[in-house]
Image (cartoon, helix red, strand yellow):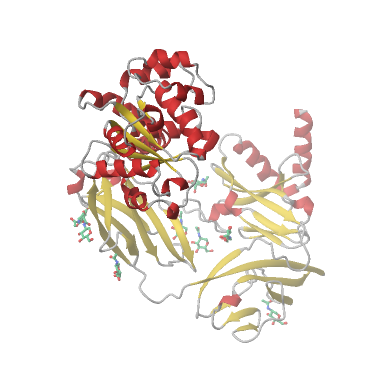
Amino acid sequence: MMPLVFTLLCLCVLKMGGFSSSVTQASVQSDVQCYDWGVWSEGSVRVYDGEVAYIYCPLFSHPTLYNYTQNSSQSLVWYQHTHTQELEQPIDRKSQTLLRVREYLWIQPATAQDAGLYICMLRNLSSCVRISVELEVVQKKGECDLSAQPQLNLTVPFQSDRILSCPDLKKLTLPNSTYTISWYHLCRSTKFRGDLELKGDNVVIYRMLEPYKGLYTCVVSYQMNGRTLQFTRNINVIPVVPDFGSKVPIILNPANDQIYTVILGDTASLSCRVHLPHLYGEKQDIWWTIDNKTVEQLADPRFSSPEDNLLSYNYGDEKKERVLYVKDFSADDLQREFNCSARNSHGFNTSRAILKTELYVPTLELGCGLGVTLALMLMMFVIYHVFWLELLLLYRSWFGSDERYTDDKQYDVYISYARNSEEEEFVLSTLRRVLETEFGYSVCIFDRDSLPGGTITDDTLRFVGQSRRLVVVVSPCSAVRGTQALLELQAGLTSMMHGGSLRVVLIQFKPVQRKSWVKELRQARLALTLIRWKGEKSAPLSSRFWKQLQLELPMRRTTQHTHKQTQLPDVTQHTPDTHTQHTHQAEEKLIDPYSTSVL
Ligand SMILES: *[C@@H]1O[C@H](CO)[C@@H](O)[C@H](O)[C@H]1NC(C)=O
Ligand SMILES: *[C@@H]1O[C@H](CO)[C@@H](O)[C@H](O)[C@H]1NC(C)=O
Ligand SMILES: *[C@@H]1O[C@H](CO)[C@@H](O)[C@H](O)[C@H]1NC(C)=O
Ligand SMILES: *[C@@H]1O[C@H](CO)[C@@H](O)[C@H](O)[C@H]1NC(C)=O
Ligand SMILES: *[C@@H]1O[C@H](CO)[C@@H](O)[C@H](O)[C@H]1NC(C)=O
Ligand SMILES: *[C@@H]1O[C@H](CO)[C@@H](O)[C@H](O)[C@H]1NC(C)=O
Ligand SMILES: *[C@@H]1O[C@H](CO)[C@@H](O)[C@H](O)[C@H]1NC(C)=O
Ligand SMILES: *[C@@H]1O[C@H](CO)[C@@H](O)[C@H](O)[C@H]1NC(C)=O
């Protein structure tokens, strides 16, 4: 392989005649001394297939490199390494398409086969340096291509004038050749009028306006050695703010009256926003100082300030932000001077950030605490609303006092009801039974407990007076004058109003219209508790009805307990009478055979 390559190389070299000796010298020397700069990426050239291209040898623009003059001892050699070639080849001086003009290599025209690396080498007897430039050949999409990469970005301030000339036109050494030039703006060729005019080879913008921005394309074609050659250039015109006015950076934040709140012990982040006027790509600095020291000078790991970032762009004017982070902000830091500064070639601005502490509020912990408190409150609210009766009963069972020990009354409950009504059935079969057998109250029912012979009025008053509670089962019939029910009610209300130890409790078995109530009841209604029977729903002992009733009746600590534990609270099931007697033997001295027969 190697001898073959060498032979090929020698053949090439020999073919090139006079040029050959220098090439062999170069290859001999480059083995030891040729310094390779590699590929110069910024200089890469993109050309349309079939158009003229030129490649500039970048060695001449490098300030430390040799001054190239025709009479110096150094010589410039070009090599070509296209994608189809295996080896670098020296460029034939006599080639029709490859033309060397000083530090430029012209390819007229370039075709897809010419794509590849072009190496320019500068050398004398003792030293050698080389650099490569890439040539890219692309297909042209029609006469004008809007998506083309511009060769030039041209910023033009609004209201100002500008002459657009086709790049590289002057570079063509065509002293006496004729050429034609076509201009397009946004790929339209007819729109040159008004403040935008075609003048000679150039496009003149008399007054820059928004519609004149965008891509300008020039296509130049000329004759050379009997061939028609052509090249295309694209210029991107970018409008920017006018050049007049102050170009000093303006610090927007910290503003004069702005106060930054910091939290002691937490990370403080101070944001600085600066308006940077358009200055044609000039570098403009934004930085924070702490007591007139930059973050770098301070060299404290607690302080950091990442690079600024662009917030907005408006025709060249920029708004940028730079943030200063201070970890574990301390009370001492509060005494320091935090300044944000900005500088460009036109001036300098600085502004101090005024700081204020805020008490350390551990938001997360607080949030959790608050959440838990709220949840607890909600829970208690729900519990209270669902179980308030139970809670009250429980409270009373702990703290209430048994009235039996403080008075000498005979009955706990006196039940008043209208005879011959629906209520009567309820009183005798349900209310009385539950109060006596389930809750263990001593119940007085006039018809059962009064002894025959006495005056009804006197007996009623006596019995009511002997009871701790008067339970009135409200019924439309209660209103009938002269009935026993009305008498009982009047007795109870009178006793209650005159400071007696009797309390009146109302039970509504069936909805009764308020206006059908007796006058006395209507008047006393507001001061009395009304418990409503809600049919089947109220039947079980665990229902609201019984709990409410229990709450209104005197407290029974022990009996209540034993019953709750031993008996399933189902009122609809009739408990045997033996049981009734067994539990309430002590209290029920006056068992009437009549009442049991009703059950
Ligand atoms: C190249 O030549 C110019 C004058 O032609 C001179 O000013 C410059 O210093 C020279 N550069 C070097 C690197 O010698
Ligand atoms: C090259 O030659 C010109 C005269 O022909 C002379 O003036 C110039 O100084 C020379 N340059 C160098 C670098 O020798
Ligand atoms: C070759 O060029 C280098 C750099 O300019 C110079 O220092 C050296 O003297 C030259 N050598 C010869 C033999 O001319
Ligand atoms: C022109 O600007 C565009 C976008 O800003 C950029 O991508 C492109 O490289 C620039 N071209 C030149 C030649 O500066
Ligand atoms: C261009 O051509 C004109 C005549 O056609 C001639 O006088 C002139 O010298 C030429 N210029 C160059 C640079 O060759
Ligand atoms: C910055 O400087 C400009 C011009 O000197 C001035 O108008 C502006 O008020 C200054 N702004 C601040 C925040 O210092
Ligand atoms: C801040 O420090 C710079 C040098 O680092 C000095 O020129 C400037 O006057 C100082 N400014 C103040 C306000 O102390
Ligand atoms: C900080 O900014 C204020 C204006 O807000 C200025 O008076 C002061 O001199 C600045 N301090 C430093 C150190 O630059």
**In this orientation, which residue lies closer to the viewer: 187 or 28?**
187
Count of numbered badges drawn on the protein: 0
Q: Left or right: 96 with respect to 447?
A: right
Instruction: Tell which residue pokes out farthest to the front in this image.
Output: 453
Q: In the figure, residue 343 lies in which quadrant?
A: bottom left
Tell whether 214 sits left or right of 496.
right
Q: Position of residue 466 (x, y in %)?
A: 27, 31
Q: Residue furthest right?
A: 226
Q: At x 40% / y 67%, what residue is drawn?
A: 277
Q: Nearer the viewer, residue 221 or 147?
A: 147
Judge from the rendering whether residue 344 lies leftward or rightward of residue 541; answer left or right: left
Towards the viewer: 185 or 447: 447
| Residue drawn at x 33%, y 26% as measured from the top left | 394
Q: Residue at x 47, y 54 (%)?
A: 63
Q: Is residue 126 visible?
A: yes
For residue 5, which quarter of the picture? top right
Image coordinates for residue 116, horizontal then vertical, percent: 71, 48
Residue 496 % position (x, y): 26, 42
Q: Quadrant of the N terminus?
A: top right
Residue 326 visible somewhere in the drawing: no
**Is 452 in front, or is 296?**
452
Horizontal and vertical percent position of residue 379: 40, 34
Spot the residue most to the bottom: 194
